[in-house]
Amino acid sequence: MFKSITLLLLLFFLSFQTGMGQNSKEDSISLSRAKNYTIQFFLQSMKETSPVYQGREFIAYDKNIMGSPFFLNTEPVEGILEYNGIEYPKILFAYDLVSDKVVIKNFTNEYMMVAASEKIRRFNLGNHSFFRPEPDVTFRGLNDTGFYEILYPGKTMIVAKKSKKVQYYQGEDIPYQFTFYSRYFIYDQEVFREVGSQKDLISVYKTKDNEVRKFLRTEKLHFKKNREETLVESAKFYDQLIK
């Protein structure tokens, strides 16, 4: 049954693609719509047996912990998820920063399931894009497994490893809280280098350090005050200098 439906969808998508031109913007939009329709039809046909809905049930955290374990939101939201080679453009999920897992609403939206991380290549939540380094591709410097956010996709690429931990704060009305952490990496000379200060940032741009320092002063950017904006804007500026 699964193979029959998959073959039917593949033939439908290929026949639609073959009948279209390759260069027009309208064709690209139509192709994207056809792709989305095909995937939605696939999900509706497979329902809860669809591969993306396979996994163990998500166990919620203690309600007495202040905050949310998820990235940005307290509940799953609609986003884009590439799972097992298939891009799902409209699926409800959340990114659990404590366990570094993607949590998907099941087909009937009755509960949440933990997706297999090794089958997820990338996902988008709002304007935030995440990827998981593939085991057969070298990402020197990114030693932690799991997902990284792409802050800047240019030549001097900037990525972030984001996480949350349950911390105990003595004397607080609600002592247990989810605490957010970020680590940042800049791609330089075929390796990702971790940046934890303004000094680290300048050292990466050592061939243009004077220009970068002047740019940061002019734009009133400082790593300690606004880490992500400082990282991204300095990388954009540096890429303009070396192009």
Image (cartoon, grey):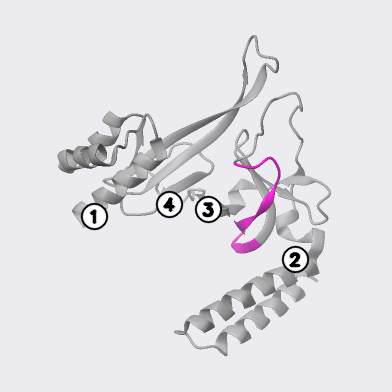
Alpha-carbon neighbours of circle 1 within 10 Å: few (<14), some, or many (≥20)?
few
Mark-to-mark CA distance, 1 and 3: 24 Å
Residue drawn at the location 52% of the way across and 83% of the way down: 26
Q: Residues within 10 Å of mark 2 (few under 14, many from 20)?
A: some
Under mark 1, the amino acid is Gln
N-terminal label among 1 and 2: 2
- The region drawn magenta spans 72-89
* CA separation in Å, label 4 and label 3: 25 Å
Q: Name the mark nearer the viewer: 4 or 3.
A: 3
The circle drawn on residue 231 is: none
Task: Examine the rendering and report whether any part of residue 141 can be seen.
Answer: no
Left or right placement of residue 40 versus residue 235 in this view: right
Q: Is residue 61 above or below residue 117?
A: above
Q: Is residue 74 magenta?
A: yes
Around disc 4, counting alpha carbons within 10 Å, would you say few (fewer than 14), some (14 to 19), or many (20 or more)?
few
- Determine the image quadrant of residue 74: top right
Quadrant of the image containing the C terminus: bottom left
Comparing 94 with 43, the one in front is 94
Measure the alpha-carbon separation of dots 4 and 1.
Answer: 27 Å
- Amino acid on which disc 2 is placed: Leu
Disc marking residue 127: 3
Q: What residue do we see at 41% from left, 40% from top?
A: 228
**CA separation in Å, label 1 and label 2:** 44 Å
